[in-house]
């Protein structure tokens, strides 16, 4: 098929690579303009742009798709379909009918659950055991279009957003190739009564509330890894928690946030229900380190308080 592709991060790059490897012609790839990233805030190309440059494809990075000149350029390419994956820009209604088969979106959830910007993080936060990928026929709403194909993906107990993202990206890549191979597909309308919204993640959400149960805090730590990183305070200084697990063997009778054990390799903290064993931490300006390495350099002892 003649495919216009629109996407930006690694999730989208996996799908683009799969489409190219399947033999589809991609005359134009759209991705967001380069933006500052990393600790040095240097302008960096998106994962999709890096792939485009490596495959020597034609690239466009418009700040918006609302410009009539952009829509006219896409129409001139006479596309069979437009595939959208985590593009990050709105697809205007005037563009939807331009491709012969319309615009298909690769969405990282089992719609209508978790419509919106952060379906992977929200699934982990909610304690979902299963998520997946949906190929959706785009309409004017926010992830409200008819569903064409779905693939389920299990959420393991220790999955974080990074590991689950990679599983979903692989599933999405396979599913979009299948969708184009089997087109036309029978659309299934979404049931609005079953929908829920995956709001964009904010840094404020990543602040650890030690009064919450250990299992919930564990989900938050995993959901906010790799970004923005679950964080707390120790001695008034920021401290990120990258990996933890609900603990057993020590009764959490102390106030939430109290360090229960700080022996070599074991850092256990009381929560509102149960306790949490911290496995990987990072001080402001430092590097990630294991609990054992952290305790070797920080005078943290039982009875100390986190979160203040």
Image (cartoon, helix red, strand yellow):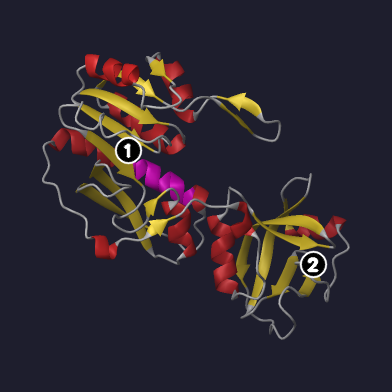
Mark 2 residue crowding within 10 angstroms, few (<14) / some (14–19) / many (20+): few
Q: Is residue 107 above or below residue 87?
A: below
- Residue 227: image x %, image y %? 59, 48
Per the image, label 2 sits on a secondary structure element best described as loop
- Which mark, residue 308? 2
Write the start and end of the magenta stretch as one range: 163-172
Select label 2 or label 1 by which is in front.
Answer: 2
- Pointer 1 residue: 173
Mark 1 residue crowding within 10 angstroms, few (<14) / some (14–19) / many (20+): many
Q: Nearer the viewer, residue 15 or 136?
A: 136
Q: Quadrant of residue 236?
A: bottom right
- Residue at image location 23% in from the left, 47% down from the top: 145
- Residue 58: image x %, image y %? 37, 14
Q: Nearer the viewer, residue 88 or 44?
A: 88
Q: Is residue 76 above or below residue 185?
A: above
- Residue at image location 31% in from the left, 41% down from the top: 106
| Image quarter (top left, top right, bottom left or bottom right) of the N terminus | top left
Q: Quadrant of residue 140?
A: top left
Our reading of the magenta stretch's main secondary structure is helix
- Residue 170: image x %, image y %? 37, 42
Q: Is 169 in the magenta?
A: yes
- Which mark, residue 50? none
Q: Is 239 in the magenta?
A: no
- CB atoms at circles 2 and 1 under 8 Å apart? no
On screen, residue 214 versus residue 237, left or right, reads left
- Residue at image location 49% in from the left, 63% down from the top: 125
Q: Is residue 49 above or below residue 128?
A: above
Q: Count of labels shown?
A: 2
On screen, residue 147 versus residue 212, left or right, reads left
Per the image, label 1 sits on a secondary structure element best described as helix
């Amino acid at each position: 098929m003649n495919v216009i592709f629109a996407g930006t991060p690694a999730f989208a790059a996996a799908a683009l690579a799969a489409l190219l490897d399947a033999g589809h012609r991609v005359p134009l790839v759209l991705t967001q303009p380069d933006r500052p990233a990393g600790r040095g805030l240097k302008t960096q190309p998106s994962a999709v742009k890096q792939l485009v440059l490596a495959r020597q494809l034609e690239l466009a990075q418009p700040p918006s798709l609302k410009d009539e000149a952009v829509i006219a350029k896409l129409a001139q390419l006479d596309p069979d379909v437009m595939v959208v994956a985590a593009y990050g820009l709105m697809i205007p209604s005037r563009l939807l009918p331009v491709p012969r088969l319309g615009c298909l979106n690769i969405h990282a959830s089992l719609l209508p659950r978790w419509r919106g910007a952060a379906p992977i993080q929200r699934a982990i936060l909610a304690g979902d055991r299963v998520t997946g990928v949906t190929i959706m026929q785009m309409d004017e709403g926010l992830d409200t279009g008819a569903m064409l194909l779905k693939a389920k993906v299990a959420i393991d107990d220790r999955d974080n957003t990074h590991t689950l993202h990679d599983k979903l990206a692989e599933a999405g890549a396979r599913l979009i190739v299948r969708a184009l191979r089997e087109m036309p597909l029978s659309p299934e309308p979404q049931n609005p009564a079953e929908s829920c919204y995956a709001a964009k993640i904010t840094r404020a959400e990543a602040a650890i509330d030690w009064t919450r149960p250990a299992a919930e805090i564990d989900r938050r730590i995993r959901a906010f890894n790799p970004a923005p990183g679950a964080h707390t305070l120790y001695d008034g200084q920021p401290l990120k928690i990258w990996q933890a697990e609900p603990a057993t063997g020590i009764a959490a009778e102390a106030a939430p946030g109290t360090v229960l054990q700080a022996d070599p390799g074991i850092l256990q903290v009381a929560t509102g229900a149960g306790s949490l064993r911290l496995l990987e931490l990072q001080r402001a300006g430092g590097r990630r380190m294991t609990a054992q390495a952290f305790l070797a350099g920080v005078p943290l002892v039982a009875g100390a308080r986190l979160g203040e």
